[in-house]
C-alpha cells in the first residue's frame, strides 16, 4: 500500500512539474529584457594628452541594463586586464605612472555614460554611453609593488566597437581619462 501511495505521489508531482515547465516559455526578447551579458576583448595604445602613452589590454562581460552613474551603485560587470605606461603620465587620474610601470586593472563600476576628451584641455568634450557595443567603466589600476592596493583608483575609461570621435583622424574607440584615445583592436559578442 505504501509503495503505491509513493508511486502515485511521485507521478502526480512529476506531472505538475511537467505542466508548469511546459507553460514557461521565454522568448529571446524576454531574455534580453531580463538582462543578457555582452562580452568584450581589446588591446590598444592610448595617447593624446600633453604627456603619457599607455598600452591597455583586457576584456570581460557586462549587462548594459545595470549601468549607473550613481556612486557605488550595484552594476553587473566583470572586466580586467593589463596596462603599461610606455611614457610617463603627468596629468589626470594616472598622474605619477612612470615609463615602464603598470601591471593590471580591474573594474569598480559600469557607468551609464561619461564625458571625455581625447586631446587635453583644448579638446571639445564628448559623451560616450554604455550600450551593446560600448562599455564605460570606472577601473582601478595597479603598479608592481602596490600589491592589492590600487595605485590609481576609480579611473574612467571606455572601450567601443565604434569610433567615438569620427572628427579626429583614426579610430578613437578606447580611452582612459587624462591619457587620451586610441585606435584599438576591439571585439564585442552577445
Image (spheres, grey):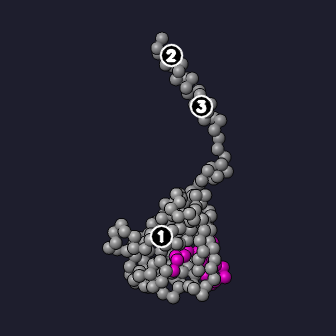
Picture coordinates of residue 130, whole percent (x, y): 60, 65
- Residue drawn where x is 62% and y is 71% of the image: 128
Closer to the chain start, of discs 3 and 2, is 2
Residue closer to the observer: 39 or 147? 147
Q: Farthest residue to the left: give it.
A: 145
Residue at 57% across / 23% down in the picture? 12
Q: Which mark is residue 5?
A: 2
Mark 3, other Cα within 10 Å: few <14 / some 14–19 / many ≥20? few
Where's residue 86, x and y in %? 43, 82
Specify which label sits upstream in the sequence, 3 or 1.
3
- The residue under the point 52% across, 72% down is 156
Q: Secondary structure at mark 3?
A: helix
Q: Is residue 171 above or below residue 34?
A: below
Q: Quadrant of the C terminus?
A: bottom right
- The prevailing secondary structure element of the residues shown in magenta is loop
Q: Nearer the viewer, mark 2 or mark 1?
A: 1
| Element at label 1 | strand
Between residue 187 and residue 112, name the one nearer to us.
Answer: 112
The disc placed on residue 154 is: 1
- Asked if residue 66 is among those painted magenta in the image, a careful observer would answer no
- Residue 165 located within the stretch drawn in magenta: yes
Q: Position of residue 95 (x, y in %)?
A: 44, 81
Q: Which residue is mark 3?
A: 18
What residue range appears in magenta? 161-178
- Mark 2–mark 1 Cα distance, whole angstroms, equals 62 Å
Q: Are marks 2 and 1 in contact (CB under 8 Å)?
A: no
Decide if residue 75 is in sight here: yes
Amino acid at each position: 500500500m505504501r509503495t503505491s501511495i509513493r508511486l502515485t505521489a511521485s507521478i502526480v508531482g512529476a506531472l505538475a512539474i511537467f505542466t508548469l515547465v511546459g507553460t514557461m516559455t521565454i522568448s529571446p526578447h524576454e531574455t534580453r529584457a531580463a538582462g543578457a551579458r555582452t562580452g568584450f576583448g581589446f588591446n590598444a595604445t592610448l595617447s593624446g594628452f600633453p604627456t603619457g602613452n599607455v598600452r591597455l589590454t583586457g576584456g570581460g562581460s557586462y549587462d548594459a541594463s545595470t549601468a549607473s552613474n550613481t556612486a557605488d551603485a550595484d552594476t553587473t560587470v566583470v572586466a580586467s586586464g593589463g596596462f603599461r605606461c610606455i611614457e610617463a603620465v603627468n596629468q589626470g587620474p594616472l598622474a605619477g605612472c612612470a615609463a615602464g610601470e603598470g601591471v593590471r586593472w580591474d573594474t569598480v563600476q559600469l557607468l551609464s555614460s561619461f564625458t571625455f576628451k581625447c586631446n587635453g584641455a583644448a579638446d571639445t568634450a564628448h559623451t560616450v554611453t554604455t550600450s551593446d557595443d560600448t562599455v564605460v567603466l570606472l577601473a582601478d589600476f595597479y603598479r608592481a609593488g602596490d600589491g592589492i592596493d590600487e595605485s590609481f583608483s576609480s579611473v574612467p575609461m571606455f572601450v567601443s566597437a565604434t569610433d567615438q570621435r569620427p572628427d579626429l583622424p583614426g579610430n578613437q574607440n578606447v580611452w582612459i581619462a587624462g591619457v587620451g584615445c586610441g585606435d584599438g583592436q576591439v571585439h564585442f559578442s552577445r
